[in-house]
Amino acid sequence: MKRRGSFSLVLAGLVFVLGLVVLSPNASDSPDGLERVALDHGLDDLEKEHLLGDGPLAGYSVRSVEDRDLSRALAGAAGVVITFGVVAGLLWLARRYGGRERAP
Amino acid sequence: MHIPDGFIGAGTSLGAAAVASGGLTVAIKRAGAALDDRQIPLAGLTAAFLFVMQMLNFPVAAGTSGHLIGGVLAAVLVGPWTGAVAVATVVVVQSLFADGGVTALGLNVLNLSLVAGLGGYALFLGLRRLLPRTAASVVTASGVAAGLSVLAAALAFSAEYALGGNGGASAGTVTSAMLGVHALIALGEGIITGTTVAAVIAVRPDLVYGAALLDPDLEPAAVALEERAA
């Protein structure tokens, strides 16, 4: 039974992901596919003000940080950490309380 | 491809939310039953990777960009149910950043986690079955399924628009526009997915759920699980 640990891989992976976060200010600013269709066909004025549009992390920027790139990178890092935590937590709970379904 | 608030009417949005909640509940249960503790950090990492990749828009045409969804990628790496949970979590977290509407969450989870993720994985299984049992087949099947999953998600949005869209443009116009614009984005998704799967297979094939049948050392339980799923 081959069972190699994945701790170092996960750690390396997270470092890589955070590295990508740092690159995010260089990402394209152009509207994405859905936004493009909305713009081209007059749907964009349908868009309502986002309920969390005034939130501290709205638009992938940290409100109190002035430098745009740093702000975006910090928001991205926060998102990465939150996402990792929520997924790991959810699955841990699912395993703990749903594990009984597994065949012995 | 995150639908903002206001595009789709309340009825359709609620219907989508109901389907999304149901699907997600099933996914969470099945993920919990199939996972072992060691795989949880990897699932978290996959979701984190998807989150950042969705921030990294790449240009596809003048004035248009695309980004990875990652539904098939997640499914091929950590299994379809865990993958679906990962994508859904990314979508929900993104709404905290005002990316994708809060009332549109059901629609976005449905289109990206269930249609692109689970549906895309079904396509992956079908394609893999047609190909010889090699790593290259897993890579190819992932890439092609990923590309198709983008178009599937685009069609899902078009259907939602047809059912409850608030705009003046006709459903037919929106559908052909969505498919046209997403053709190149689908190509990008396919390339990124295939490349990433290839990279992980090269270093740790045991960590690629979709390649389980290729690993002679893999414990029989995992292979049995694979064969049951396939």
Image: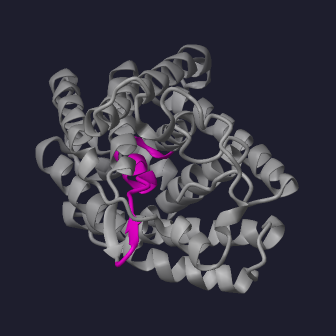
Percent coordinates x, y for residue B57 in the rendering: 34, 58
Residue shown at 65% from the left, 46% from the top: B101
Q: Nearer the viewer, residue B209 or B225?
A: B209
Residue A88 placement, left or right of A5: right
Side of B32 relative to A72 (left or right):
right
| B34 lies above or below B124 | above
Q: Quadrant of residue B130?
A: bottom left
Q: Is residue B188 magenta?
A: no
In the rendered image, the residue lying farthest to the left is B203
- Quadrant containing the N terminus of chain A is top left
**Most foreground residue, A77 or B85:** A77
Quadrant in the rendering for residue B17: top right
Quarter of the image holding residue B205? top left
Residue positioned most to the right: B11
> Of residues B59 and B186, which is closer to you in this image?
B59
Q: Which residue appears farthest toward the top when viewing the image?
A: A96
- Foreground residue among B71 and B56: B56
| A73 to B230, vertically: above or below | above
Magenta stretch holds residue B64: yes
| Residue B171 shows in the view | yes
What residue is rendered at 53% in x and 45% in y? B99
Report the number of numbered marks.
Answer: 0
Q: Residue at x 51, y 36 (%)?
A: A58
User: Where in the figure is residue A60, as x and y percent of width and height?
Assistant: 42, 38
Residue at image location 59% in from the left, 48% down from the top: B100
Q: Which residues are magenta?
A: B62-80
Question: Residue A1: in sight, yes or no?
Answer: no
